[in-house]
């Protein structure tokens, strides 16, 4: 990793007062959570159905048991711990520099690291609701349930508060994201391939001074970046 680029990144952070971080699956790979599109990612593993199908609303409704089998086996990592990127972002927020984290991840690791203003575009595995009576259940309840998790009050099916394929994003989260990104003087895009829409389109609202892209693989925004770093995001942040 080029020390000169890291130095440039450090100086830009020092010069910024309204930083927004926009992150994806690559932020959590160093915490042991696999991403989707890399060679070891979920989309390159062999299943009876494609992962996009298995985490779709239709599949959840029509094949609920198989949905939860896949969901519990491949999408839940209760023992994962925040890495250097999560921790540094929480520090920057405490210092008053970072104003928001916008994440496509559903693992809750930013909150576990201490971040407060975390906008979860795709929901969270830590929030689960009965589809009948709307009672709340934590992740532990879902993990320990046999097969399809059922409400202990009314027997209704419990659904994770996770945005599945075919489902829309929360409009209030979108509005807050746009507000933060449009006010930012630095936008850090990290650990995301920027191919999932509408999430990836939200960065078009950035009109600030420094666009930083940190990712292992090329992204469609590399050409627009003021600072481009090809590397693991935890390693990059541990050098800040």
Image: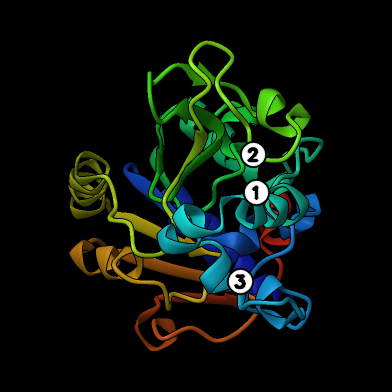
153 to 68, vertically: above or below: above
Q: Position of residue 72 (x, y in %)?
A: 72, 47
Q: Is residue 78 left or right of residue 98?
A: right
Q: Which residue is mark 2?
A: 148
Q: CA distance from mark 3 to mark 1?
A: 13 Å
Q: Residue at x 19, y 63 (%)?
A: 205
Q: Residues within 10 Å of mark 2 (few under 14, many from 20)?
A: some
202 to 217, vertically: above or below: above
Label pair 2/1, CB-CB below 8 angstroms: yes
Q: Which residue is mark 3?
A: 51
Q: Which residue is mark 1?
A: 68
Q: Residue at x 40, y 78 (%)?
A: 225
Q: CA distance from mark 3 to mark 2?
A: 18 Å
Which image quarter is the N terminus in? Answer: bottom right
Q: Position of residue 141 (x, y in %)?
A: 68, 23
Q: Considering only order in the chain, which callout, 1 or 3, is on the residue closer to the N terminus?
A: 3
Q: Is residue 111 left or right of residue 233?
A: left
Element class at badge 2: loop
Element class at badge 1: helix
Q: Position of residue 146 (x, y in %)?
A: 76, 34
Q: CA distance from mark 2 to mark 1?
A: 6 Å
Q: Of residues 56 and 161, which is closer to you in this image?
A: 56
94 to 196, vertically: above or below: above
Q: Residues within 10 Å of mark 1 (few under 14, many from 20)?
A: many
């Amino acid at each position: 990793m080029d020390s000169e680029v890291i130095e440039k990144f450090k100086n830009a952070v020092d010069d910024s007062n309204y930083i927004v971080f926009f992150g994806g699956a690559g932020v959590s790979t160093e915490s042991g959570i696999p991403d989707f599109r890399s060679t070891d990612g979920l989309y390159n593993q062999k299943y009876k159905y494609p992962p996009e199908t298995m985490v779709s609303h239709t599949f959840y409704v029509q094949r609920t048991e198989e949905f939860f089998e896949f969901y519990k086996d491949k999408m839940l990592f209760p023992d994962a711990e925040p890495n250097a990127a999560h921790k540094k972002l929480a520090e920057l927020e405490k210092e008053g520099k970072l104003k928001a984290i916008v994440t496509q991840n559903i693992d809750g690791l930013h909150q576990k690291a201490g971040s407060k203003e975390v906008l979860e575009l795709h929901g969270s595995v830590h929030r689960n609701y009965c589809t009948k009576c709307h009672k709340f259940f934590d992740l532990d309840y879902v993990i320990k349930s046999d097969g399809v998790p059922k409400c202990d009050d009314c027997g209704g099916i419990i659904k994770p508060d996770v945005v599945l394929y075919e489902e829309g994003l929360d409009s209030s989260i979108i509005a807050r994201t746009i507000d933060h990104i449009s006010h930012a003087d630095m936008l850090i895009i990290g650990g995301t391939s920027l191919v999932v829409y509408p999430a990836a389109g939200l960065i078009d609202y950035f009109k600030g001074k420094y666009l930083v892209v940190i990712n292992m693989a090329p992204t469609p925004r590399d050409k627009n970046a003021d600072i481009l770093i090809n590397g693991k995001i935890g390693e990059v942040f541990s050098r800040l």
